[in-house]
Structures are given as structure tokens and as C-alpha cells.
Amino acid sequence: MADLGFIGLGRMGSHMASHLLRGGHTLAVYARRREAAEPIVAAGAIGCASPADVARRSDVIFTMVTDTAAVDAVALGRNGIAETARPGSILVDHSTISPAGSRRIAEALKGQGVSMLDAPVSGGWWAAESASLSIMVGGDDEVFNRCRPLLELMGKTITHVGGPGAGQIAKACNQICIVVTQLGVAEAVLLAERSGIDFDRVQRALMGGFAGSRVLEVQGPKMAARQFEGQVESRLHHKDALIALEAARALGLRLPAAALAAELLTTLQERGGATLDSAAIVQTLEQRQSN
């Protein structure tokens, strides 16, 4: 048994925290909305009033929050982890944030004797629920090896990518592949429809060949049916695409396909589509045809 903490009990985090609790560990939890913590507290977790309270009780603290600013506040802000974390404790951040921001936070915690792994995840809430996430990890080898048994309670594919920030770079690569492929699927949907061909049949043909992908399988039918109730809200893919482009610019790289996908996602946000599934990018692309 270990004394664990989990901060951020949204759609993903609530499932991930539950797997840790079911693994037999003591688990202290914090969520901004108290009602979000109620189910797992009822299952045996310890409810806490702040991130600092979680850190005070924990040897390993997991975070799953929205963005770089949120991790900054939880880790280094008032009533944050850094105020009460035990020397030798570990922060495992599962959020998708800026690689540079992740390295900065890790360096600040290191000065207080706290190690950090950046460990963003892929697979969606359904993979969080089934403990089959892909977890890409950056940080020290020895710290990773200590945490691996805990990560295996939540994920199926656990990969140590490299040093601090490497996990976030891997997640940026992951998101580039998703948003660019998503745009390609949207273009394929429009071409099939304008040609008078049933996209369902086109999709079945494509899935049997080199174009087959998880994005085509899941997003294609949503685009064809124009059903955009959120599985992965577009605001999240938009945020992640901008993180990838920011990381690329810092290295002097231009990513034209990712930039175009990000541009369309930006337009979708501006038109009120933040909470729509990111498959709604097809609607934005369709609207551009008449301009």
C-alpha cells in the first residue's frame, strides 16, 4: 500500500483515481467542485479541502487538470502542492500542458525535494474507465520505475519517452496526428457527399486499406451524420493543437498541416462550438466552401 493523492476528478480523472483506490492504496482526493469528489469519497477515498491538504497526506500525487495555468496553480500556487509536499514525494501530472511549462514546474518542485513526472494520457474517457490508457512519460528513470506499478493500474501502454517534458512532447505529437487526420477525414466526407456517394460505404472500403485509422472509424460516422454531441470536446483538441504549434515554433519548425487544423478549430471555437465534439470540424470546413 502507498499513500496516494489525486487532484482533478473530471470525466477522465474520476475513473483514473478509482483504479488507484481499487488497487488497495490509501487515496486522498481534491476537486474544485465538491460534488465531483463525492462518489469516490463514498467509495473510501479521503476528501480534502485543497491541493496542499492532498500533498500533506501523500507520497505520490497525481494531477489531471485542464491546462498549464491550472497545473501551475495546483502545484505552485496558494494552498498548492509545493506548500506541504513531503521531501522525496512525487508529482505525476497527467494533464496535457506546455512542455516548457511542465519543465519549469518540475524545476521549481525539484528545489523543494519533490520529483515530477509529466505523464499525459491518450485514449479518451472510455480508456480511462477500462484502465487501458496510453501513458507517455517524461522524467527521471528511477522515479519512473518507482511509479510504473501505479501507472499500470490506469493504463495499458506505459512508455518512458525521455527526460522532463518528453511526455508532453509525445502528447503533442499524438495530438498532431489526431487533428491532422481528423481534417483529412472531414475532407473525405465532403468529397464523397458532393460526389453523391454514401460515406458509410466509402468508410467501410477505407477501413480495410492503408487509410484505416481509429480517427476514421470513430469520427467519420459522426461527421457524415452531423452528430456532434461531445465525446472529446473541440476546445480540448484546439488547446492541444496550439500547444503543439507553440512547441514547434520554439524549435524553429513550421507544421503547415497542424496549423491549418488549428485554424479550423479556432474558427469552430469562435462560432460557439467549444463543447461540440471535434468532429464538428467538418461543419467549419463545409461553411468555408461557400465563402
Image: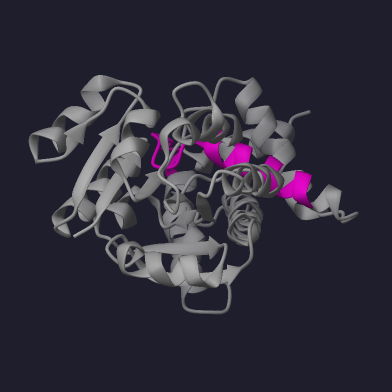
* Left or right relative to 44: residue 89: right
Question: Measured from the top left, where is residue 126 in percent x and y?
Answer: 30, 52
Count of all numbered marks drawn on residues in the image: 0
Is 276 in front, or is 154? Answer: 154
State the residue at coordinates (23%, 54%).
20
State the residue at coordinates (18%, 54%).
25
Looking at the image, is 269 positioned above or below residue 240? above
Considering every residue shown, the one lying at the far right of the view is 252
Is 180 in front, or is 167? Answer: 167
* Left or right relative to 137: residue 163: right
Q: Quadrant of the N terminus?
A: bottom left
Is residue 233 a member of the stretch shown in magenta? yes
Is 155 in front, or is 203? Answer: 155
- The image quadrant that residue 22 belongs to is bottom left
- The image quadrant that residue 163 belongs to is bottom right
Residue bounds of the magenta highlight: 225-247
Question: Measured from the top left, where is residue 223 in percent x and y?
Answer: 49, 45
Question: Measured from the top left, where is residue 245 in percent x and y?
Answer: 76, 47
* Left or right relative to 60: residue 269: right
**Which SS type dominates the magenta stretch?**
helix
Residue 7 appears in view: no
Q: Quadrant of the C terminus?
A: top right
| Colouring used for the render | one colour
State the residue at coordinates (32%, 28%).
31
Residue 86 appears in view: yes
Is 30 in front, or is 242? Answer: 30
Is residue 234 a member of the stretch shown in magenta? yes
Looking at the image, is 214 positioned above or below residue 247? below
Question: Measured from the top left, where is residue 243 in percent x and y?
Answer: 68, 43
Looking at the image, is 120 positioned above or below residue 67? below
State the residue at coordinates (64%, 54%).
172
